[in-house]
Image (cartoon, coloured by chain):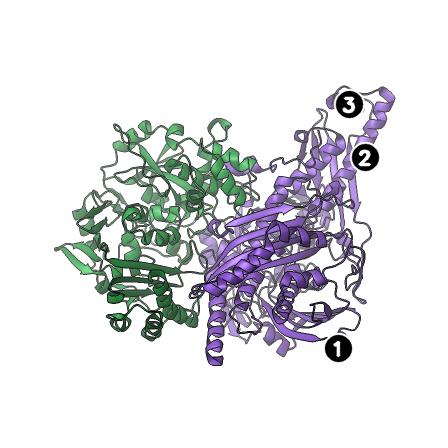
Amino acid sequence: MSAVGKDVPHDSARGHVTGESIYVDDVPPLFGELVVDFVWSPYSKARIVSLDLSEARKLAYVYTHEDLHHNRLGPIVADEPLLVDDGLCTFRGQPIVVVAAETRAAVDAAKRAVRIEFEELKPILTIDDAIAAQSFIGETRYIRRGDAEAAIASAEHVIEGVFFNQGQDHFYLESQAAIVQPGENGAMHVLSSTQHPTEVQEVIAHLLGLQMNQVVVTTKRMGGAFGGKEAQATHPATMAALVSQKTKRPTRIVYDKDTDMHVTGKRHAFQNRYRVGFTRSGEIVGMKVEFFSDGGAYADLSPAVMARAMTHAENSYYIANMDIRGTVCRTNTPPNTAFRGFGGPQGVATMENVVEEIAAFLKKDALDVRRVNCYGVETRNTTPYGEVVPNNTLPRLLTELPERCDYRARVDAVRAFNASSQTQLKGIALSTVKFGISFNTKFLNQANALVNIYLDGSVQVSTGATEMGQGVNTKIAQLVADELHIPYERVTVMITSTEKNNNTSASAASSAADLNGSAAADGARRIRERLDELESRIGKQETWEKLVKAAYHERVSLGERGFYATPRLDWDWTSGQGTPFLYYTMGTACSEVLIDRFTGDLKVLRSDVLMDIGKPINPGIDRGQLVGAFIQGMGWVTTEDLRYDEKGVLLSHSPTTYKIPNINDLPEVFNMDWIDVENPINVGGSKAVGEPPLLMAISIWCAVKNALQFVANGDIARLKLPATNEEILMRLTEYAKRGAAVA
Amino acid sequence: MRDFVLVHINGVPHRIAAPRAFETLSRFLRYDQRATGTKIVCEEGDCGACTVLVGRVEDRQSCLSASEGTEPRQAGLPVLHYRPINSCIQFLFQLDCTHVVTVEGLARGGTLTPVQDAMVRCHGAQCGYCTPGFIMAMAGMYECTSHPTVGDVRAALTGNLCRCTGYDSIIKAALEATDQPKIEEIYPSAPIVNAIKQYECDAVRLQGLQASEPPSLPGGQEAGRLGGFFKPNDLASAIRFKSENPKCVIVQGATDFGVWCNKRGFVAEAMMSLDGIEGLGDVRHEDGALLVGGRASLADFESAVRGIVPELVPIMDRFGSPQIKNAGTLAGNIANASPIADTLPFLFVTNASLELTGLSGTRTVAISDFYLGYKKLDLQPDELITRIIIPLPSKDETLRLYKISKRSHLDISSFTAAMLMRRSDGHVDSIRIAYGGVAPVVLRLPKTEQFLTGKALARETFAEAGEIARGEVAPISDVRGTRDFRLQLAQNVLQRFYFDIA
């Protein structure tokens, strides 16, 4: 009768396939509702010389920063103005003026009537420019162990280089959106497409001069989020709330796709310098890596993203002497933000790149280099930041996957193919991931849940988890059903509301099911204990429904608030040491690619993924996370190409120009599997799966690099990320020219 | 002359007049009908979230299904033939005498149809925002075939983006739903066809509004509100209207026009549909040439070439989604005059010509003479493209087509090329080469062609030809690729060609 471990459908699936599921913009307009929009800076950096709102005010409600009680927000430090307030626009897309009217056409007319004279200033648009200008957000941070400098100096071999990765747009299909309904005595009721209702609540209250208890934020579901609605859903919701506060009318704000892509932050571009010393067998003896991320104009979540990049810098490999530095660059782009993986992909890709380069240098197979360096189970299992890797399954995965996917024979076949084909090139790589689970910030690792049982035996559960497609509500219902010993169908997870659950953390860091599931299970368990106690007094009841009735008549409470705080966690930035993670989700992936030597066209022939995701609460949902994240990662490393002009104008701002994977891009052979290992420290024996599989797609990028190695004339092939057809062709052309010059 | 269009939606007839008829179908569904299952995401036909089925009584009948041919037509009363389209770039005025089926219209009585049920079982939906579009695209696929292959599924769903699932579960669901009913089984054609029959011969004229009248619809956007719309029922009226309204836009598929309106606020001075004109929808194979009518859809063109120009099939597969190809026309692809239009290099090397009809009759112009400059055409204000004549490659000619784009499918090209070669004894007898994406118009490469003529087929020769070709083009850098990238492609593609034919 256990529901946990069962492949039950997503609790919204039926609504999704019939079109009945309600998203923010599907809610019918409320009486008197206003459409809210905003005028944003058209320049990456500009001074506002004059602002004339007189014409616009004849057409619509128009507000500026002067209408706010406070004007600074930010999830870590409140450094970002909601609306430009010092006459200086610091990124293209920055809101300046909020406009609202009864119709879309009137809003558009009023936006056109806003007269702003700008003085365009020279922006900082790249990491190089920011470093040159010493334009940073916060201090450089360090994680150090041993003496990396000395170890590298005395190493047999040394490689150095720079790893570049571009950002990535979230491309959630439902753009940022919110509806606000003003209530009595200044109260606000907000329906927001957010991963973090509490943050929306807190920011609205603070900026509008309300108490948090006057603001209720609800989230039914999001049409995708991927981190993009963790910190940046607050902006539209707060703009709408401002208008509702001023007009006492309901408001709605919905970004169109192009606006969304222009004005919101993305995954961070990184530019990482590394020096690594190693032995002739490929064992890394020391490594220095200096991370620079493009944080954009304000802090947003950039320092935390950098922290995760740094704590994933060594990935699955034990490096005795390591020096990791991280600096967030301040540029004039929209503040970059959370995106599935949260810095982990950038850190891991840098390390996997290094491993590929060591193998190329030593003319060894990269798998052997990975095995030599892989974390041990009993020894060599402490990270540079001092956390011991618990229940390490990496060595097992690194043995099993190569066997399953016939790695060695395929490496030989790739070599033979490349020796014979004049028109095509193949590459193969097997990469790893060790992804730390928990928020790096200790206090975020808590959750509460409300469990209510009704007289007919049906159950409502409310938590701070938000549903963005990942199936967290389905998993929570499964956990609660098992704790209460009732069929899954009796449990419904309710709309997320700050009225039901206070001070919640974002559904992020892959941990929404871990935290909220644990809290909900805790609440359910305590009710069940009371019911068991009752049954021991009055005797076993025939059915659940009879038991509930009996409990009611005996005046036993049928509601409970559960709570969970992740044990063990500890982190100290001054030392760069601690135990930031409860456990790690681990995996390996092998990808093989085919490249056209004349056009640079890339095809993924085969990907095999084998992971340790514990015992899934819902294997169907977890498989969906694995496949979906992998393909999203494949987009990041191949076709998703954010292009800007020289003034920082985003040119790829809609699906016509920004190419996320299409149904025809799936690897021709695609095997996704996990090993059967329980994770005793987490709810239901499960592991978090939201982010880690995204990093498995780095195997595709490594395979491209491996292919280029065959034509690099003995040099180490270099490759930027993403490996677009253009990037590949330009590298092929460069190597062909260099080869011709040498010949 | 009617002043409204008749559109059935999920079986219910709607008479829609100006200005409402100037709205996009997606906005009308969501904000007027409150049928919010249809989602609006990109509003440019590139994500498929707004996919619906449009049923028409058709003289043409083609299916974009590789594994199964066109199913024979039933005798007797005509039936509605349903195709998926993107409702975000389709205006109500284009949908006269059609039946629109939305996601709300499938599960009648609360019972899921097999594609819906399979999507639930296979975890084909995560966040759910793309799901209604996928459901409708799958239903569209099952209109054409009952036992799809994986290839059919990929072809049918290439126009639908999903950011959550990675598609694997969706493919599985699509393959499992083999007992999906035809729309005919859910909505019998007879009553709808009978209703349409009373109206389908009418011309339609929708008056534009005065500029002083503010837009008033909940969707907030009315493409043709100033110019008005005309759907004539004969060619002479069409030509007369065009001569009287020289800036009239022929809105046939609206696959690009819809984007202009949604994204750039384009307002046409007048608009015309050729839907009411007999014969212009035909695609015929005659005397070694393919004759394509002026309003024949890209889908019909693709069906026609499938058996006779196999080299074009992979290009058409990647050119666009079924939703786009069902709406867009070959004439539109030509008249839109993009230098990276995917059909143009093919039309250039086959020496295709255009039949233009105007007040003074019909003339024929070679495609290579049709483009006078960037988006400048040899087309008089009163003229319409009424036919495209494509001489088909003969058996002793070798045709190769290339489309290079960042993403292989459903992406606007960075670079395109076509080569048509005649050879004997290991030599090039003659060759025609056309490139797109390297100049303001599609180019023939006379110097490269001349160099290759008479040469032996050897890699070195084509390598040298590549260098000549590189000198014949002048690409720009843009979002789809840098100048250097395009120059390298212009050079390399001739070697790629050599290996493909050697």
Residues marked 2 and 1 touching at CB (< 8 Å):
no
- Discs 2, 1: same chain: yes
| Earlier sequence position, callout 2 versus callout 3 | 2
State which mark lies toward you, 1 or 3.
1
Is residue A200 visible in the rendered image? The answer is: yes
The residue that disc 1 covers is A154
Seen in the image, is B192 located left or right of residue A130?
Answer: left
Marks 2 and 1, how far apart in space?
Answer: 60 Å
| Earlier sequence position, callout 2 versus callout 1 | 1
Q: Which is nearer the eye, B490 or B431?
A: B431
Q: Quadrant of residue A351?
A: bottom right
The chain to which mark 3 is attached is A
Which structural element holds mark 2? helix
Could you classify mark 2 by the number of other residues whose Cα lies within 10 Å: few (under 14), some (14-19), or many (20 or more)?
A: some
The residue that disc 3 covers is A547
The residue that disc 2 covers is A526
The chain to which mark 1 is attached is A
**Amino acid type, callout 1:** Ser
State which mark lies toward you, 2 or 1.
1
